[in-house]
Image (cartoon, rainbow, N blue to C red):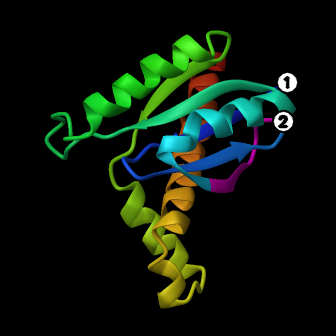
Amino acid sequence: MGRILALDYGRKRTGIAVTDSLQMIANRLTTVNTKDIFVFLKDYFAGEKVDVVVVGLPVKLNNSPSEIQEEVKRFIASFKKQFPDIAVETVDERFTSSLAMQAMREGGVARMKRRNKALTDAVSATILLQDYLRARENKKNRERNV
């Protein structure tokens, strides 16, 4: 079984999180300059088996597309061309940045460190991945109960 990788895509940086090999636990991996994301992914995929890549889809509170959503969709299209054997799924990424800040505050991360946008992006990717894993588990449980 391969891992699941989550990407919190941004214009400048992309936060990355990954599961363990059993696809049970989400872990913060790193943050990469977005201009270098495909180089990073190619290197990562060369060393790790990945079954699914989860990409945060930015949506406004009223469910309309955010300003960056078209850019994210273009990224996904490019990803599918470069890595056609890896499944891509999207998840709603509303509130992940504020949840990341809250998690870091509650986790005792110092104020100066919380200002590090790269850290926030990686924590946001971890939250995206946790949400994806939780939704997948809930779906499996519902299917078992039918």
Which residue is at a point 74% across and 48% down the rendered structure image?
25
- Under mark 2, the amino acid is Leu
- Return the x and y of residue 105 as percentages of the image width and height: 50, 81
**Along the horizontal axis of the image, is 111 left or right of 84?**
left
Q: Residues within 10 Å of mark 2 (few under 14, many from 20)?
A: few
Q: Is residue 146 visible?
A: no
- Return the x and y of residue 17 as percentages of the image width and height: 64, 48
Tell me the distance, in whole angstroms, between the alpha carbons under discs 1 and 2.
7 Å
40 magenta-colored: no
- Under mark 1, the amino acid is Met
Foreground pick, 97 / 121: 121
**Residue 1: mark:** 1
Residue that label 2 marks: 22
Is 34 located above or below residue 81 in the figure?
A: below
Is there CB contact under 8 Å for labels 1 and 2?
yes
Q: Hey, which quadrant is residue 48 in on the image?
A: top right
Which residue is at a point 31% across and 40% down the rendered structure image?
58
Magenta-colored span: 22-30
Foreground pick, 41 / 54: 41
- Return the x and y of residue 43 as percentages of the image width and height: 75, 35
Q: Hey, which quadrant is residue 138 in on the image?
A: top right
Q: Mark 1 vs mark 2: which is more N-terminal? A: 1
